[in-house]
Amino acid sequence: MIQVENLQHTFLIGKRGKEKQVPVLKGVNFEVNKGEIVAIVGKSGSGKSTLLQVLAGFMKAEQGSIKVNGKETAHLTETESAAFRLRQFGFIFQNFQLMPGLTAFENIELPLKLQGLRKAMRKEKVKKLMDKVGLTEVADHYPNELSGGQQQRVSIARALITNPPILLADEPTGSLDSETEQDILLLIQSLNRELGLTFVIITHDEEVATIAHRRFRMYDGELVKEEA
Amino acid sequence: MLFKDQLDFVTQHIKKNKLRVFMTILAATMGCAFLIVLASVGFGLQESLRNEILSNETVTKIQVYGDKQLTEEQVQEIKKMEHVETVLETISVNASAQSFFEDRDTTSNLILSDMQDFEQVNGKLAKGRYPTKSNEIVVGYHFAQTLLNDTERDVIAEKSKKAEAEGTYYDGSEEGYKESLLGKNIDLSLVPHTGTNDETQKMSYTIVGVMEKPSYDWMVDNAIHMDKEQKAVLAENLSTDSNMAEDELFYSEFNIYADTLENVKPILEKLKDKGYSVFSVTEQLEQMNVFFLVLKIGLIFVGTIAVLIASIGIFNTMTMAVTERTREIGVLKAIGASPKLIQRLFLMESTFIGIFGTLIAVVISYAISFAANAALPLILKAATGEEAFATNDITFSLIPWQLVIIAAAISVGVAMISGYRPARKATKIDVIQALRQEL
């Protein structure tokens, strides 16, 4: 499903003219199979977030290849990359990243709007999904009226609404207490089991990594496979 | 994203920042209204002058000037030209006409012309008909008013004196012959302009028509029009009393009339090619139009500066909007909104400000224009005491639809341009940086 080969990237840090080169990805190789939960674990500064950003197309790596469902995505233009994300990826962020001015329902509806779906169809789809993830009662609530767990559920529902084959999660439980963290991990597991969705989870939390089928550890820009 | 959803997105953000957007719209409105009102003065003055020229002269008239008079053959040749309706020869008599009626008398100009041509050119009379017989005449609108007896002359002199003391002017409209003059006979004698003051023998004429009121209030028309057949009779009468030769007694003026305004120019050019000295009021209009075109462009240019100043407000508002929504833009980009869509959403917002500002500005401008046209004459009259300002002859401000289109294009165009940079900035927002922003 995802093949990453020899991904390399260097950051320039410091004042202009006196920049230091800091290699952040040093030839990363890995593969994600369909229906898998893959965890990429690492300490802060290990380069795991950069890997996710390159994977998602938010930034371009200097070298290497990324193939998603056989399509090379490392060299897409910004517009092509946006269209690709809309079809192929769902995103779950650490800080939920919900639109504060939109209700839970409208937040989940947003990707469908971007896809240009008509209102009636959007309404039907969102309602169905909200039922499934247990959000029906808070449909008209704004993000600041929701608990952390509810906000992350809304965020997951927003990621799922376009039926993407791959979900990319960046510290999905980073802002949650341990009880809510368990709820969210269970939800991810059940979505993986029932819908066959592929998850790539970036985390520093070993607990989160326990739900993964395969685990990779990021050390100073290099990725090492770990036994589950 | 559907267009309706894009509109929803934009209106939602506008509602969130009502006051700021309102203030920006206000600035755009003021700029655009200033542009329209300023330019409307140019349009208004042009219209006033145009009306002034057109009401004074017949627009289809082409004057023949110069010392050389047209010969009969030349007149016939011109008459045969395409689109020439008629050539009117107007003969002025080098003498004052003294008219006597009952105990009243008046002095006026005597004008001779072919009555058929005269009727064709002049059109409707205020009263009566055009002469068909040799002793019939048509008199000017004010002829009856100027027919005075000695008592009335004294009254007018007294009233004028009184008016003068008050600083005004008395036009004598309350005196004169009040009954209809149609069918009445007057006695006419001529006093040549030779300084001898020798009157000719009296001739009797019947008034059969009265001319229309002149287009200006201040004009007094008490002229006598008769058929040019009478030239011989008058000449004979005059030459016995004075020693003037016939060509000194009469002066002919030729006016060519085109069938429509559009055909004046081609006829004019043809006649000029043939060596005639001709002039039409339309030439004057053309020169005036060029002048006003330059003036209007200048005024629109000055007005555009106001719009440009307002555009700084739009630029600020949009830059603020983009900065404030950096995180939202980042999320939108992350979940798959294309840079083009984001640019369009912000451009729509600045365009909305431009369109809304323009709409309000148009309404306000019409109101100001209407108020200026209604109030300025009164203010000027109060300030100067001139009655002329109180009439509605002067248009101070005129907003034709072309001006609205030009102003709207400038205003909305400038709004879009000033929103372009912030919109571009929005598309360049770095997703990673944006998502890291504090909530």
Image: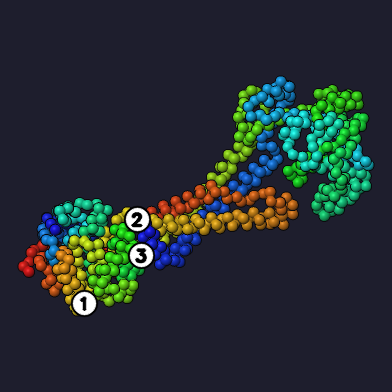
Disc 2 residue crowd, few under 14, some 14–19, many 20+, Cα 10 Å: many
Disc 3 residue crowd, few under 14, some 14–19, many 20+, Cα 10 Å: few
- In three-dimensional space, the C-alpha distance between marks 1 and 2, rounded to whole angstroms, equals 38 Å
Residue B131, above or below B431 = above
- In three-dimensional space, the C-alpha distance between marks 2 and 3, rounded to whole angstroms, equals 15 Å
Name the disc covering residue A155, or none.
Answer: none
Image location (x, y in percent) of residue B362 = 53, 55
Name the residue beneath numbered marker 1. A180
Determine the image quadrant of residue B336: bottom left
Labels 1, 2: front one: 1
Determine the image quadrant of residue A4: bottom left
Depth check: give the residue in front, A84 or A4: A84
Subunit of label 1: A
Amino acid type at mark 1: Thr
Subunit of label 3: B
Q: Residue at x 81, y 31 (%)?
A: B132
Name the residue beneath numbered marker 3. B324
- Say whether residue B104 is left or right of residue B21: right
Q: Residue at x 54, y 45 (%)?
A: B297
Q: Residue furthest top?
A: B73
